[in-house]
Image: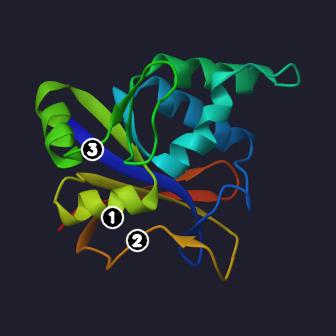
């Protein structure tokens, strides 16, 4: 049975905005390994559109960026959207009954399936489908933006914490 994990970079005041702060070298290497190990990813439309950047090579990329792109392209992706009409390579559009699709993926696959996008994660939280939350805390205060938790925070239990690089701490929680 697969485990559904919601993990994102986050400011100290609880906002997710990859445009406001970027991962340093150690955290970027961590994300490469994280993506390589995934069974797949489930995206909301907006987050998937952001990540489509990795579908095409860019001549200015570093070797690490090329490694991340290769890992991202290899993994299966499911995109939950009612407004999208098509998705890119190795992706499946989920237009209706995403709950049934996620339950099926969870039952049929083994490993870790990442959820990207706080709104989608909020919906999956409400349905009791998130098995683990990974908050990558950066020493930044934004004061505004999209919150990590799109609705009321569910009761959680801390199960792990680890430092990644010089300034990021990953906190891992499971539903209490």
Which of the two discs, 3 and 2, sits closer to the camera?
2
Residues at badges 2 and 1 in contact (C-beta under 8 Å)? yes
Which residue in the structure is indicated by mark 2? 150
At horizontal 62% and vertical 44% (from top left) the residue drawn is 50
User: Is label 2 in a helix, a strand or a loop?
Assistant: loop
Colour approach in the figure? rainbow
Instruction: From the image, tell me which residue sits under label 1.
Output: 122
- What crowding class fits label 1: few (fewer than 14 Cα within 10 Å), some (14-19), or many (20 or more)? many
Camera-side mark, 1 or 3: 1
Secondary element at image label 3: strand
Could you tell me which residue is drawn at 66 percent across and 38 percent down?
Answer: 28
The spot of residue 105 in percent (x, y) is: 19, 32
Indicate the position of residue 76 as horizontal and vertical percent values: 39, 23
- Answer yes or no: is residue 160 visible: no
User: Dividing the picture into quarters, in which one does residue 96 lie?
Assistant: top left
Q: Position of residue 24 (x, y in %)?
A: 74, 46
| Residue placed under numbered mark 3 in the picture | 4
Relative to 66, 37 lies left or right: left
Q: CA distance from mark 3 to mark 2?
A: 17 Å
Q: CA distance from mark 2 to mark 1?
A: 5 Å
Q: Is residue 124 above or below residue 64?
A: below
Q: Residues within 10 Å of mark 3 (few under 14, many from 20)?
A: many
Q: Return the residue found at the far right.
A: 60
Question: What quarter of the picture does the C terminus occupy?
Answer: bottom left
User: Observer-nearest residue: 51 or 96?
Assistant: 96
Question: Which comes before the other along the chain, label 2 or label 1?
Answer: 1
Report if the CB atoms under discs 3 and 2 are less than 8 Å apart.
no
Q: Is residue 8 above or below residue 60?
A: below
> In x, y percent, where is residue 104?
13, 34
């Amino acid at each position: 049975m697969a485990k559904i994990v919601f993990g994102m970079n986050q400011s100290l005041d609880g906002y997710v905005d990859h445009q406001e702060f970027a991962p340093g070298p150690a955290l970027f290497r961590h994300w490469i390994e994280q993506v390589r190990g995934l069974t797949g990813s489930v995206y909301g439309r907006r987050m998937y559109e952001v990540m489509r950047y990795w579908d095409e090579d860019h001549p200015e990329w570093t070797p690490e960026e090329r490694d991340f792109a290769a890992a991202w392209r290899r993994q299966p992706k499911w995109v939950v959207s009612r407004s999208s009409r098509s998705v890119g390579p190795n992706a499946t559009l989920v237009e209706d009954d995403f709950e049934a699709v996620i339950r099926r993926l969870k039952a049929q696959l083994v490993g870790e399936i990442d959820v990207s996008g706080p709104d989608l994660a909020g919906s999956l939280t409400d349905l009791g489908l998130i098995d683990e939350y990974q908050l990558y805390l950066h020493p930044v205060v934004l004061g505004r933006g999209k919150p990590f938790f799109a609705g009321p925070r569910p009761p959680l239990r801390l199960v792990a914490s680890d430092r990644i690089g010089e300034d990021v701490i990953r906190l891992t929680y499971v539903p209490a």
